[in-house]
Amino acid sequence: MTDEQQPAGDDAAATGKIEPVTTTKEATAPADPAATPWDRSRGRRIAVRSLVALATILGILSVFATWANRQLLDTNQWTKTSS
């Protein structure tokens, strides 16, 4: 006997018929059958994309800030680089 099937009762055991049992996924299905997991996780997708965009912008700014600190704001380094 598998996890998805079990005898329906004494009559089923006597006749050898096995009926499928409703799984928990089917029992906990959302009330709106048109709602897919993608619809339900829209907020997470927006949050992930926002975090990736923020990390990209911060990465670019940090590289520029490091370059500016080492080249533009340090006069000795600027003269070495220019010559």
Image (cartoon, rainbow, N blue to C red):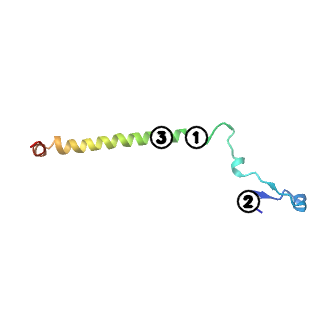
- Considering only order in the chain, which callout, 1 or 2, is on the residue closer to the N terminus? 2
Task: Choose top left, top right, bottom left or bottom right for residue 15.
Answer: bottom right
Identify residue for label 2.
Answer: 3
Q: Position of residue 34 (x, y in %)?
A: 66, 36
**In front of the other: 82 or 39:** 82
| Helix, strand or loop status at disc 3 | helix
Task: Choose top left, top right, bottom left or bottom right for residue 54.
Answer: top left
Name which residue type carries label 1.
Answer: Trp
Identify residue for label 3.
Answer: 47
Identify residue for label 1.
Answer: 38
Give the residue displayed 36% in from the left and 42% down from the top. 56
Name which residue type carries label 2.
Answer: Asp
Name which residue type carries label 3.
Answer: Ala
Bin the neighbour count of mark 1 within 10 Å (Cα to Cα): few under 14, some 14-19, many 20 and up.
few
Q: Is residue 80 left or right of residue 18?
A: left
Note whether 6 is above or below 83 in the view shown.
Answer: below
Nearest to the eye among marks 3 and 2: give it: 2
**In front of the other: 82 or 64:** 82
Q: Which mark is residue 77?
A: none
Q: Position of residue 4 (x, y in %)?
A: 74, 56
